[in-house]
């Protein structure tokens, strides 16, 4: 039953991501001095004149946009908000965003590293951490996990200037790997969260489920802190 609920939640998240109303930022047929005939792809990252970090959501080529025939329209998600969005702002391309974070639940804590890629809004993630017994105040095993996450700005669903919406995102991740205690066993983890950025720093509130073969299935709320570089 728990696995069915997790799968259902992932399907709902995927549907929201696919059919969210478009309130992303459209810059038209040119990005700064970059020729749009060059290799502009989903997942590439740019900075605008307000130092907002934008990530390419989609690229539509050979379309009529604003009276420009056979132009290219690039849609962005605002990944990190640092100032007001200015339509038509010149953009500067930068490298992928590397996310580093620490996440603590009631019975386990994880450190996570992720990176944006051409699969956006999906991203690969590697996690490592400890499970612990609160009553005995001791670590019970070590965890090493790898998998994928997905996240998208809430502003794609609700157009608002409210900070918690403008800078907020809904995310989920699933990862599989090893649990190491007296022996090496299989481990899997799922997480769902609300994430908010304050410049490059971010915090998360959510819930995660950790499965360890031969052990307990742990479901707990968690809080996370991180930075995007």
Image (cartoon, rainbow, N blue to C red):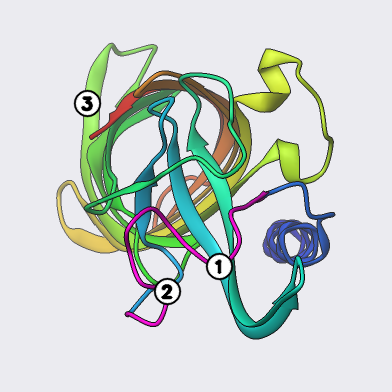
Pick whichever of labels 3 and 2 is earlier in the sequence.
2
Label 3 and label 2: CA atoms lie apart by 53 Å
Instruction: Please state the extent of the stretch shown in magenta in the rendering.
Output: 25-38
| Structural crowding at the residue carrying mark 3, measured as other residues with C-alpha within 10 Å and reported as few (<14), some (14–19) or many (≥20) | some
User: Which residue is drawn at the image coordinates 15% and 49% (left, top)?
Assistant: 182
Instruction: Point out the frontmost of discs 3 and 2.
Output: 2
Pick whichever of labels 1 and 2 is earlier in the sequence.
1
Disc 3 secondary structure class: strand
| Residue 213 showing in the rendered view | no
In the image, residue 169 sits, relative to residue 93, either above or below, namely: above
- Magenta span dominant secondary structure: loop
In the image, residue 164 sits, relative to residue 185, either above or below, namely: above
70 left or right of 97? right
Instruction: Point out the frontmost of discs 1 and 3.
Output: 1
Residue 125's x, y, as percent? 32, 55
| Structural crowding at the residue carrying mark 1, measured as other residues with C-alpha within 10 Å and reported as few (<14), some (14–19) or many (≥20) | many
Q: State yes or no: discs 1 and 2 in contact (Cβ < 8 Å).
A: yes
The residue carrying mark 2 is 36
Disc 1 secondary structure class: loop
- Which mark, residue 29? 1
The residue carrying mark 3 is 139
165 left or right of 118? right
């Amino acid at each position: 039953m728990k696995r069915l609920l997790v799968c259902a939640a992932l399907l709902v998240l995927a549907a929201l991501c696919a059919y969210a109303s478009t309130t992303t930022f459209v810059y038209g047929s040119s990005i700064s001095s970059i020729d749009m005939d060059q290799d502009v792809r989903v997942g590439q990252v740019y900075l605008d004149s307000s130092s907002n970090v934008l990530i390419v959501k989609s690229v539509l080529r050979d379309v009529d946009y604003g009276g420009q025939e056979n132009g290219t329209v690039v849609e962005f998600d605002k990944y990190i908000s640092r100032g007001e969005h200015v339509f038509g702002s010149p953009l500067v391309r930068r490298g992928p965003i590397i996310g580093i974070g620490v996440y603590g639940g009631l019975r386990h804590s994880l450190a996570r590293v992720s990176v944006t890629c051409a699969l956006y809004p999906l991203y690969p993630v590697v996690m490592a951490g400890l499970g612990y017994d609160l009553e005995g105040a001791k670590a019970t095993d070590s965890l090493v996990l790898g998998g994928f996450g997905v996240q998208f700005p809430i502003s794609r669903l609700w157009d608002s200037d409210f900070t918690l919406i403008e800078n907020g995102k809904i995310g989920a991740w699933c990862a599989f790997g090893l649990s190491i205690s007296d022996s090496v066993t299989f481990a899997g983890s799922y997480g769902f969260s609300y994430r908010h950025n304050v410049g490059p720093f971010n915090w998360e509130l959510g819930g995660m489920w950790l499965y360890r073969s031969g052990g307990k299935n742990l479901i707990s709320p968690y809080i996370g802190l991180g930075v995007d570089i």
